[in-house]
Image (tube, rainbow, N blue to C red):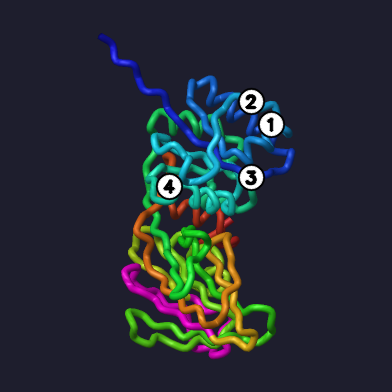
């Protein structure tokens, strides 16, 4: 008796986009249908597609982590890096691999070009890819639940001053030992993935994924000899903030909350990792050279 090959199941996550990329989305979905892939789409994005494109009206949908089918083979994120970060909130600890198609600008995480969609999909469907695990950060407060339980970040967790031109003071302890009292506009705690984002723009180092480290980067510190610090991913970081306004802002990737200064934070490595799909000839260092012009010297050209 011949065994039937299981049908590939994918989830599509996206947000409202410019009409200039509508044709690419239509072509993507048509190609997936031609490949006999079972598709489920993020419901808010699906409503947008039904209004703005020629997308079919009979796909199943999901709205959050809880109703995302756990037998999905992989997820496609359609948009830029911000969309990719939002998709992580849906995937969480499910282990579902994710690939990003870049409809944005930089495309560091969502690095599949929109003019190479069919080629990329064919590679993924044929299993011609590798999985790269990425560490996340988790943040907890001593007196409340944060971000409705979505208290994890693939890029960075950051505290900022709120509604004032005055700096804040961030007392930081590592494993209950005093690290420093940062007098600055804020403090960034970044993963290796996030080391090429906000942390990098504030003078932090680039950290290779899988290195087992995080980086603590002050934002415009008043004391100029306070520099970014690379720490083990296994530490526990406690933060206590003092500010003239009695509040501060906490961001967790693309999410943010305003908190009172009596809120103490505990930041640790998240108990799960995200699986990024990486295609052939797609390496971390080639991405650095292409997206950040890393190591490019005009004298060589």
Label 4 near label 3: C-beta < 8 Å?
no
**Structural crowding at the residue carrying mark 3, measured as other residues with C-alpha within 10 Å and reported as few (<14), some (14–19) or many (≥20):** some
| Mark 2 secondary-structure assignment | loop
Nearer to the camera, 162 or 148: 148
| Mark 1 secondary-structure assignment | helix
Which portion, as a residue range, is magenta? 217-241
**Structural crowding at the residue carrying mark 2, measured as other residues with C-alpha within 10 Å and reported as few (<14), some (14–19) or many (≥20):** few
Q: Earlier in the sequence, mark 1 or mark 3?
A: 3
Nearer to the camera, 107 or 261: 261
Residue 84, image x, y percentages: 54, 49
Label placed on residue 106: none
From mark 3 to mark 4, how far is it between C-alphas?
20 Å
Q: Which residue is mark 2?
A: 57
Q: Which residue is mark 3?
A: 15
| Mark 3 secondary-structure assignment | loop
Please tell me whether mark 4 or mark 1 is closer to you in this view.
1
Q: Earlier in the sequence, mark 3 or mark 2?
A: 3
């Amino acid at each position: 008796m011949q065994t039937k090959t299981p049908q590939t199941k994918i989830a599509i996550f996206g947000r409202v986009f410019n009409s200039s990329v509508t044709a690419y989305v239509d072509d993507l979905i048509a190609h997936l249908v031609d490949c006999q892939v079972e598709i489920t789409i993020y419901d808010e994005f699906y409503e947008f597609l039904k209004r703005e494109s020629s997308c079919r009206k009979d796909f199943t949908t999901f709205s959050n982590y809880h109703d995302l089918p756990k037998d999905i083979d992989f997820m496609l994120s359609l948009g830029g890096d911000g969309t990719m970060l939002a998709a992580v909130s849906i995937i969480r600890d499910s282990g579902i691999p994710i690939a990003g198609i870049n409809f944005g600008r930089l495309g560091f995480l969502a690095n599949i070009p929109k003019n190479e969609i069919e080629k990329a999909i064919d590679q993924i469907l044929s299993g011609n890819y590798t999985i790269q695990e990425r560490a996340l950060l988790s943040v907890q407060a001593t007196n409340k639940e944060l971000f409705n339980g979505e208290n994890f970040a693939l890029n960075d967790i950051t505290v900022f001053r709120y509604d004032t031109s005055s700096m804040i003071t961030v007392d930081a302890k590592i494993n209950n030992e005093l690290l420093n009292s940062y007098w600055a506009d804020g403090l960034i705690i970044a993963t290796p993935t996030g080391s090429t984002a906000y942390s990098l723009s504030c003078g932090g180092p680039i950290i290779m994924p899988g290195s087992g480290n995080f980086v603590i980067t002050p934002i415009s510190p008043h004391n100029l000899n306070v520099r970014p610090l690379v720490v083990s991913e296994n530490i526990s970081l406690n933060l206590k903030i003092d500010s003239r306004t009695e509040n501060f802002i906490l961001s967790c990737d693309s999410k943010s909350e305003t908190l009172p200064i009596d809120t103490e934070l505990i930041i640790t490595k998240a108990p799960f990792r995200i699986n990024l799909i990486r295609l052939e000839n797609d390496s971390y260092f080639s991405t650095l050279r292409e997206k950040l012009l890393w190591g490019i010297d005009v004298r060589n050209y």
